[in-house]
Amino acid sequence: MPSDRRDLLRWQFDLTWSLFDYHLDRLEPAHFRREAAALSWTVRPDAAGRSVPDWADTEPDPVPVPTIAWLTWHIGWWWTVALDHLQGRTPRKRTEVEWPGDGEPTVVWLRELRAEWLAVLDRLTDADLDEVAPFPWPHDPQHTVGHMLAWVNAELMKNVAEIGQLRLLHDARTT
């Protein structure tokens, strides 16, 4: 069933994704873990060899500069949880969302999340958009699924801008 609101949110998502796709096509493994500042958050191997993102339960002050590795994990984490909620699955915990690794594995993962997101988005109706959003505002009846879709677009746009800037800085410093 067509939905003008859903179509507008889809248009906004597609626009943001086109900007992301530009950078995804140009990301090299060397981009992912480059730390742009002394205080950085990245994804590091633990004793078992699993990639674990730096994390604090309260926002540190000053805020660390994330690496592209951390930002791509972050996108995968919040997007996976949003998809879990929209599809009625038990949402995964932050520690259950594993980062695939530098380069192509992460690019493929993000493109797969996009495909899953579009499949879910295309099934939503106006009635679905008006339901209370289970994420990222638990139990807040003022925020709907439509708000959640707009939040995903905004969060993705912010993360895409950060990744693009870090990629450009890396390339400028290495040429």
Image: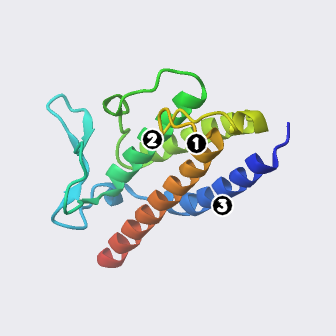
Give how far across and how far down residue 75 sits, in percent. Answer: 44, 47
Residue at disc 1, secondary structure: loop
Contact (CB < 8 A) between labels 1 and 2? Answer: no
Which disc, if any, is residue 62? none
Tell me which amino acid carries mark 3. Answer: Leu
| Front one among 153 and 36 | 153
- For marks 3 and 1, the one nearer the N-term is 3
- For marks 2 and 3, the one nearer the N-term is 3
Tell me which amino acid carries mark 1. Answer: Gln
**Quadrant housing the N terminus:** top right
**Quadrant housing the C terminus:** bottom left
Q: Dividing the picture into quarters, in which one does residue 33 lie? A: bottom left
Which disc, if any, is residue 142? 1
Tell me which amino acid carries mark 2. Answer: Trp
Q: Say above or below: 92 vs 146.
A: above
Q: Which residue is mark 2?
A: 78
Which disc, if any, is residue 15? 3
Q: How many marks?
A: 3
Q: Say above or below: 88 vs 141.
A: above
